[in-house]
Amino acid sequence: MLEVFIFATLNGLVTGFLLFMLASGLTLIFSMMGVLNFAHASFYMLGAYFAYSLSLYFGFWTGLIFAPLIVGTLGALVERYGLRKVHASGHVAELVFTFGLAFLIEESIQFFWGRDTKNYQTPDLLDFPLFTLFGQEFSAYRGFMMAISIGIFIALYYVLTKSRVGIIIQAAITHPQTVSNLGHNVPLIFMGVFGVGTALAGLAGVIAGPVLTTFPGMATVLGSIVFVIVIIGGLGSLAGAFIASLLIGLLQSYAIASDVGMPDLLSLLGISFDRGHPLNDLWTMNLPQIAPVLPYLLLVLVLIFRPTGLLGKREE
Amino acid sequence: MKKIQFFTRLSSPLRKLMAVTGLASLLVLNSTSSAQEPVRIAFMDPLSGTFASVGNTGKTILEFAVDYFYNSKGGILGGRMIEVVPLDNKQSPNETQLQFRRAISEEIQIIFQGNSSAVANTLNQTISRHNRRNPGQEVLQINYSAVDPILTEDNCSFWHFRFDAHANMKLNILTDYIAADPNIKSMYIIGQDYSFGQVVSDTTIKLLNEKRPDIEIVGNEFHPIGQVKDFTPYVTKIVSSGADAVITGNFGADMVSLARSIIDSGLDIPIYTFYAAYDGITATLGESGKGKIRLIHNGVANPLPTEERKQFNRDFKIAHPNNDITQPRIVNALQMVVKAMEETQSTDPYDIALALEDMRFTTLGGEEIWMRGEDHQIFQQLSISVHTDEGVEFDADNSGYGLVTEYQVPLEETIVESSCQMRRPRR
């Protein structure tokens, strides 16, 4: 049981950190512009596909560096020539714009790369087990994923709280007019944040592509969960997004690893139902089966009991 | 044929003249016949979304086969072309209902569908209801891949024909194969949480209990279909269960991710599957899956049995270098449906259905296959093949890796009883 617990924790952390890379960009963009970027996970997918194509010609490491840059540039262009124009028409228009963009990106990817799974592999350099515990290997690549994600978190935290740019960004979040009056170019800051946010999503795609498989559905699989994280963490709160990411990563991982379910609960209460019972599906349900639904359950609970999210500051 | 007999009865100069004018009239006839209304068949499968790759490959195969066998040779039924109408059901039962309405409004009477038994069940019920209420405008369901046994058992329908072996037939052979391996002492079952995944689980447990009661089922896991980001947590459980082998009915991205996670964890055990090949899966598994992954499927993989079949593959590859003949059963289904149309000289689903019942047909691969009339289930050779790069004449995903058949079971041994009580329409 111990080995299951240890590996569930490790897996949960890997997933959690990966989710944070997506959620951090999304929550930053939201707190700055007040717009939920529905296309955020699509940028994640773009990152994986660009990195895959680059890795075919120049190797994995080139992809790791350049794919996020390309995605970030694309993101910045989208903000500059798309979102900024739509901004004049209000938030609903922006929302619809990003919603459409998500479809556009997915279709473009299918158009250029095809619909089948891409053979995007981990680099040979990291193709060894980092350590073996109770007969199970923890691949070096997963360790690498974790290292990158933690590095990004620290860098992001440092930039936002300690650097001059971070202070201006923080100020622009709450008082854009004042920042503008002080002579800072607020639209440029917006463009930069959008670019960096999408680049982070792209980077997440680059490192997730080889292990979570690169295919046109990868944005859909991750898209909704990222929104859940941002809402649970509190819209606009980076620390909240961090906690929520780890919480959900671990929650899902533990739920899958556990072997308890309704039958255990019922037998504890001394009740039993036969297989022919009309609600048989309910009585035989177990935790691993509903693991992927748990984040949404958590979302509903958070919205009921703490609508601002764990660390959210808005609407107080 | 009748025309030629008529010619031979005439004197020879006249015959020549007749032949020439006959040829001319045939040409005229041909030019008019191209204006004849095409026979339209719908291909209803996911063409977008998570499982789009499987659906699109199927569509490519069907369209290629239609062209290869019929349209390039003047069509069927005396010059009518076949037109494939793609309908994207996104692999959702709801969308399937909508697309079915569309097929009806376009007066399409034959629907090819294969992906997801849940969708096939919906379509089966929808078609049965529609056909009952609209006599004379019936629709035929050509199921080339949905393998939930219920479709040809309790829910069997006169309007549904299955051209793939169903899950119990495949599992029967697969468990025979597993039972013959004395090294396997424990088994882990993992599958997508829907009808087919559950059938795989239930049947595997039942059959292994009969054949090898000493094999312990150390895990029986369901996960939501197309929702799992990372299979590593599941693999952790497989490892800690100490299983000697894994069996799964997963397909698409769920199959790749699962296999990759198992292999990445360093677990060196055989994985028995239904769909772990093609559409990028073979390329992604590559060297790491060599000799570990086995598939149960109908027909044969490498070496392909006949020159015709090989030529078909080669011609397909020339037309579609990035696709493979992943599902030769689509071709079988098409050929048998057309044969039924030609025999009855009709495109009426009722006539086609009657002609398909108990039809015996020799495929491109040279084997005889049989559509059982009692439940509309196809019977043919079943094979177990291994993912490898040795002895692969026709690879998958242009990766050098492909399937090589290890074990074959002839048609007669694949036959299983059916509980089908078919309600036949009266005409």
Image: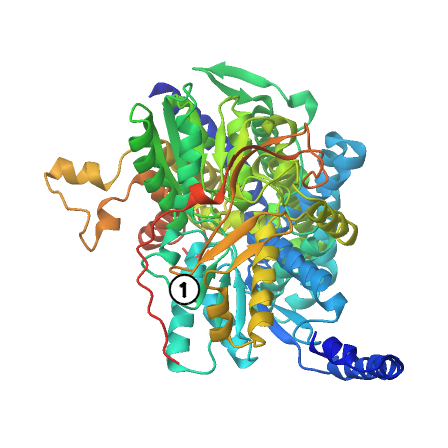
Query: Residue sitting at 20 percent across and 55 percent down?
Result: A278
Query: Residue sitting at 49 percent across and 74 percent down?
Result: B351
Neighbor class of circle 1 (other Cα within 10 Å; few <14, some 14-19, many 20+) is some
Position of the C terminus of chain A, as image quadrant, is bottom left
Residue sitting at the far left:
A270
**Visible in this render: residue B54?**
yes
Q: Position of residue A32 (x, y in %)?
A: 59, 53
Position of the N terminus of chain A, as image quadrant, is top left
- Residue A5 versus residue B12 in the image, above or below: above
Residue receiving disc 1: B122
- SS state under label 1: helix
Residue B64's image quarter? bottom right
Identify the colour scheme used. Answer: rainbow
- Residue B169 versus residue A130 in the image, above or below: below
Along the horizontal axis of the image, is B253 left or right of B400?
Answer: left
Which chain letter goes with mark 1? B
Along the horizontal axis of the image, is A38 left or right of B378?
Answer: right
From the viewer's side, name the closer residue of B228 and A169: B228
From the viewer's side, name the closer residue of B68 and B219: B68
The amino acid pointed to by label 1 is Thr
Q: Position of residue B401 (x, y in %)?
A: 67, 33
